[in-house]
Image (cartoon, grey):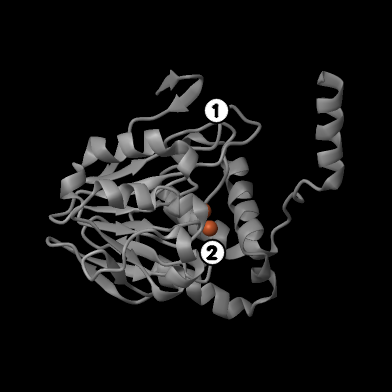
Amino acid sequence: MHIINDKTRFAPTEVAPDTFLAQDHHGEGTGPVSVGLNTMVIRAAEPIVVDTGVMENRRQYLDDVFSLVDPEDIRWVFISHDDVDHTGNLNALMELAPNATAIVDWFMVERMGATLEVPPERWRWRWVQDGDTIDVGDRTLHVVRPPVYDSGTTRGLFDPTTGVYWASDAFASPMQTPVRYVAELDAAAWREGVHTFAQYISPWLSVVDEAKYQRTVDRIEALSPRAILGCHSAVVDGPHVAQVIEATRVAPWAEVAPQPDQTVLDAIHATLDRAA
Ligand SMILES: [Fe+2]
Ligand SMILES: [Fe+2]
């Protein structure tokens, strides 16, 4: 870990052979909480980049991705859903990676509208949905929706050759300061963070049929993932995989702190007024 311009920065972590998590986050990462903004690169026979971060982190994002794979070699860019923290550098990456095909879907294209600048040629667009597979030359990736998500377009990605599952927004937790592995976090704070993140992004889960919800978690457990990666989490591996699955099972009904409301904004404004 080193500091550039007062920002915590990690070199990409090789989580499994030729499978990397490039970690970034909002702001300096100095708290009180930090939320990861990550991407995954699999150097498969046909290299694939999974999700594209936020626009304001573009320089580090592109540096990290291109430190792992040359732009001309990128064959696929998989977008897990259309939120700005997953599509922020899609257009820029596709511009710089002339041989890449963006893996999106019909609804994502509809929702992104003119913000998707990738031309719709056969070579540049592909639509995949939950349940589909993607052949990347030396392995077949499985498209599997996570149980927790904040866009109807969300699809995760499982690599059976490494056991790594990309969970998009699911199985995530904020951190006090950025760390590589959830093992470095306080266990209770991490568990509470998983509950909180799940409820904030999927508040409707508390009113769904619980047995049906559990089946969506079962589906991920049945993959027997060796590691779970996502946009907003440090690496979940080893015994933490089972722990995050268990935490996710109870997350919709767990007690979590409320989101900051108008009284918090008033306090922020008062502080700013005093500083002015
Ligand atoms: Fe999202
Ligand atoms: Fe996200």
Q: Nearer the viewer, residue 155 or 226?
A: 155
**Residue 139 appears in view:** yes
Q: Relative to 127, does residue 71 appear above or below in the rendering? A: above
Marks 1 and 2 in Cβ contact (< 8 Å): no
Q: Nearer the viewer, residue 120 or 11?
A: 120
Q: Position of residue 39 (x, y in %)?
A: 38, 47
At x 83%, y 33%, the residue is 269
Q: Position of residue 195 (x, y in %)?
A: 62, 55
Q: Position of residue 52 (x, y in %)?
A: 39, 49
Q: Does the residue tagged 2 have its C-beta within 8 Å of any atom of ligand 1?
A: yes
Distance between mark 1 and mark 2 Cα atoms:
26 Å
Which disc is residue 149 wearing? Answer: 2
The earlier-in-sequence mark between 1 and 2 is: 1
Q: Secondary structure at mark 1?
A: loop
Query: Where the N terminus falls, by quadrant?
Result: top left
In the figure, residue 78 lies in which quadrant? Answer: bottom left
In the visual, does 75 lie left or right of 119?
left
**Residue 13 appears in view:** no
* Residue behind mark 1: 28
Query: Where the C terminus falls, by quadrant?
Result: top right
At x 38%, y 72%, the residue is 105
In the figure, residue 77 lies in which quadrant? Answer: bottom left
In the visual, does 268 lie left or right of 70?
right
Residue type, mark 2 in image: Tyr
In the visual, does 270 lie left or right of 240?
right
Q: Relative to 42, does residue 217 appear above or below in the rendering? A: below
Residue type, mark 1 in image: Glu
Q: Does the residue tagged 1 have its C-beta within 8 Å of any atom of ligand 2?
A: no
